[in-house]
Amino acid sequence: MVHRRLVTRALSALVALLAVASPAAAQRALGIGGDASTLPVGTARVSAGIVWDRANERYDGDGTLRSLGANASAASWNGRYDARLASASPLVASLSGFAGFDPSLGVLSIGRRDAAQDAALGVELGVLRRLTVGARLVAASHAIEPNLVLNAGRVEGTMGFNPAWANSAARTRNATLVAQFDSAVAQTGRRITQCQATPAAAGCAPVLANVAGAQTLVGQATTFATALNQLYGGRAGAAGLPFVPLANSAAQAAINQRILGFRDQFVAFGNNALDTQGPSAAALFSRADVDTLLADSLYGYLMRPVRTVHAYGLGDVSVHAKARVFDMVGDDTSSIHGFAVRQAVAASVRLTGSSTPDPSEPFAPVTGDRERGIALQSFTDLFYSERWSATVVVGIEQSASADYVTRVAAADSPEVGGVPFPFVPASRELRVSRQPGSRLDVAVTPRVAITRNIRLGATWSLARQEKDSWSLAGPAGAGGATAADLTAWTTATDWSEQRLSVGGTYSTVEAVRRGHARVAFDVTYEHQQTVSGSGWRVAHLNRDLVTVRWYRSLWGRR
C-alpha cells in the first residue's frame, strides 16, 4: 500500500506540472504494443497503467497443460514424500504381517490460483528530435490462493500422527505395552533355563512339554517388541516414529490381534505379563494436521500453513532510451501516402529485481518476474497509407545473477512436470546462486485505424529463455541437500511462450495537433492470452492491461 501511495502522489505531481504546459505537438499514437515512435523535442509523456494477471495452469517441458497445484497433489501421500513414512513401512509390515505395506497419510489435492495486480507509472521526455529517454516504476501485488483438500472420502489414509509425540497418556500406554513384552520375554526366558535345570519345579510342565516352542516365542516376541518400540515408542521415553497406523485400519487391527496371540501363547507357558490393550493408534489425517505437520518444530518442516499469501512491493524500476535510426514518416503519421518504414532501437536498464521467495512458505509469491538486467530492442514500423500499419519488435535481454536461500528437494523426490513437491524439510535449505539465461522476445503487431482517433490491433509474441546456470553459494541451514540435488532440481529451466493479444487505443493527440481538442492523451485496453508454452516456468496466463498516457509540450515546437 505504501508503494501505491507513492505512485499516486508522484503521478499527481507530474500531472499538475504538465497541466501548466502547452498542449503537445506529438504524432498520433499507433495503438497497442510498442512502436518506433519517439517524442518531439521538449514533449513529455506520463503513463499510468494497471495490469491484471490470472492463472491456474502451467505448462510442462513438453507443452502439456497442468494445474498449478499438480505438483502439490498426491494420489497417495506416502513414503515417496516423507522419509519417515517410508521408514515406517517395514515396521508396520513386520508387526502386522502385511507384506509390502504402503504407509499413506491419504489423498492430497491442492488447487491453486495465482493473481497479480501491478500499477505502473512511466515518464518520458523527447530530448532530441529522434531521441526519447524515460523511466518506469511498477508497484506490484501478487497473491497465491491454494485450496487444500485431504481425504475427502474420509477413508483414504492408512497412517496418522503418532499420539505419543504430543500426548503423555499415549506415551505411557506404549511404554507399558513394551515393558510388558520385555517382562514376558525375560520371565519366560528365565523359566526355560530354570525348568531345564530343575524339571520338577512348579509350572515347568508346559515349558518342558514344548521347549522349542517356548524358545521360538521368546525370539518372536523380542523381535515384535523391538519393532513396537521403533514404531510407537516406549523404552526409555522413546516416542517412536511421527506416523503410526490408524485406529480403525486393517494394519492396526492386525497388530492388535498379534498382541492378543502373543498374550495367549505366553499364558500357555504360565506367563500373564501381557494384557489385551494394544498401542496408541492414530486418527485420520486432517487439514489441521497438515498445518501442524508444517508448522510444529517436532516434524522438521518449519513452514507456514497452507494459506493465501500476498506479496506487495516494488516490481521493475527501469530507465530507457529510444532513438529513431531510419525514418520515411516524419513526425506526422496522419498524412502517409503509400508505403513507409521507420526504424528505432532502444536500450533499457532494469535497476531492481524480483523479490526473494520465502522458503518457509509452501506457496511463496514474489513481486516482479525478472532480476536486474539490461535489454536491447529493435522496432520496425511498416505503414501503408495512414490506415494500415504494423510493428515488428525484436529484443534480447540478460538478467544479472542473484543469490538467495531456498529449499532444494532430493533428486529422487516426486515431481510433476519438473516441479517438485512443495513441502520440503528445513534441513534442506541451501543458499544458491542463479545466473538467468539470455532471453529473446519477438512481437508482431498489425493495426488498423478505424477513425483518426481509434485504432485496433492484435499482437503475436514469442519469448524464449535459455537455461539458467545454478551453483551453491553456501549452506544456509543444517544441510541435507547437495549439489547433485540442485542440479536435478534445475535441469529444465529453459522455456518458451507464445501469446496472442487484442486491443485498441483511443487517442486525442491528432485532435490536439489540429486544434480540435485541448488535452492530448490516449487510452489503451489490451487482453493477452498465453496460447502455447514449454517449460514449468510458463503459466497459462490471462492478462488485461489498461494504460492512460498524457502528452505535454514543455518547450520546443508548440
Image: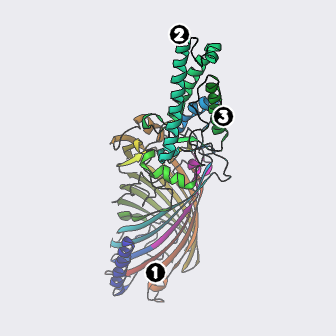
* Front residue of 34 and 112: 112
Classify mark 2: helix, strand or loop: helix
Task: Name which of mark 1 and mark 3 comes first in the sequence.
Answer: 3
Q: Is residue 348 left or right of residue 409?
A: left
| Amino acid type, mark 2 | Ala
- Which of the image's four quarters has the N terminus? bottom left
Classify mark 3: helix, strand or loop: helix
CB-based contact (under 8 Å), mark 1 and mark 3: no
Q: Which mark is residue 197?
A: 2
Q: Which residues are magenta?
A: 49-73
The residue identified by callout 3 is: 257
The residue identified by callout 1 is: 521
Q: CA distance from mark 2 to mark 3?
A: 34 Å
- Above or below — where is 503 with respect to 518? above
| Amino acid type, mark 1 | Phe
The location of residue 198, given as percent across then percent down, is: 54, 11
Label 1 crowd (10 A; few <14 / some 14-19 / many >=20): many
Residue at image point 46% right, 80% down? 521
